[in-house]
Amino acid sequence: MENWKRLVEPYTRPLFFAHSRMTRGKTLGVRGLVVEDERRVLLIEHTYLEGWWLPGGGVDALETAGDAVVRELREEAGIVPLETPRLLSIHSNERFFPGDHVLLYRIDRFERGEMTSQGEIKTVDFFDIDALPANINGGSLRRIQEALRGASPDPLW
């Protein structure tokens, strides 16, 4: 059922980008690095993109980046932070979408609740950092390695 979304995504992406550019100018996104027991990280599979990703999305008008990551975590994974998410890094996403930047937040204390997203997320799971899925998104993998393995930070997503 979700395969049709992955098939149309490359064609609808330019429309989404045009709308974002007209309504936002520069765009700002957030991703949440949810860490459980210092060994496991939360990843999601979208219904419209291949691979596993850190949860996140765009910052809406009149919304702070911190509020956006909290909203996105609840929507996509049912995660409710029990502490203020901690900003780890800021990355340019120029390769994917000119003018876009992504802020990475870390969350160590959380509770699990209900996902509020409808039809966007296929799977939500925690993975040991030594056993990440083979088809993890490259930017997500680099952020995990930087935050949990001491890799050198890359300014590009």
Image (tube, rainbow, N blue to C red):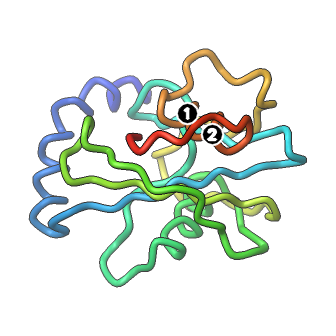
Kind of residue at badge 1 = Arg
* Residue 64, image quadrant: bottom left
Q: How far apart are marks 2 and 1 (CA)?
A: 6 Å
Q: Is residue 101 left or right of residue 82?
A: left
Relative to the observer, which residue lies in front, 1 or 69? 69
Whether pointer 2 and pointer 1 mark residues with C-beta atoms closer than 8 Å, the reply is yes
Relative to the observer, which residue lies in front, 14 or 99? 99
Secondary structure state at the residue bearing disc 1: helix
Kind of residue at badge 2 = Glu
Q: Is residue 60 left or right of residue 126?
A: left
Q: Where is residue 70 in the image (x, y as percent from the top left)?
A: 59, 69
Q: Where is residue 144 in the image (x, y as percent from the top left)?
A: 64, 38
Q: Position of residue 49 (x, y in %)?
A: 41, 31
Q: In which quarter of the image is the C terminus?
A: top left
| Residue under pointer 2 | 146
From this viewpoint, which residue is outermost toward the top?
134
Q: Position of residue 104 (x, y in %)?
A: 53, 55
Q: In this view, does 4 lie to the left or right of 115?
A: left
| Residue under pointer 1 | 142
Residue sitting at x 70%, y 24%: 132
* Residue 96, image quadrant: top left
Check disc 1: other Cα within 10 Å, few if <14, some if 14-19, many if 20+: some
Relative to the observer, which residue lies in front, 75 or 97? 97
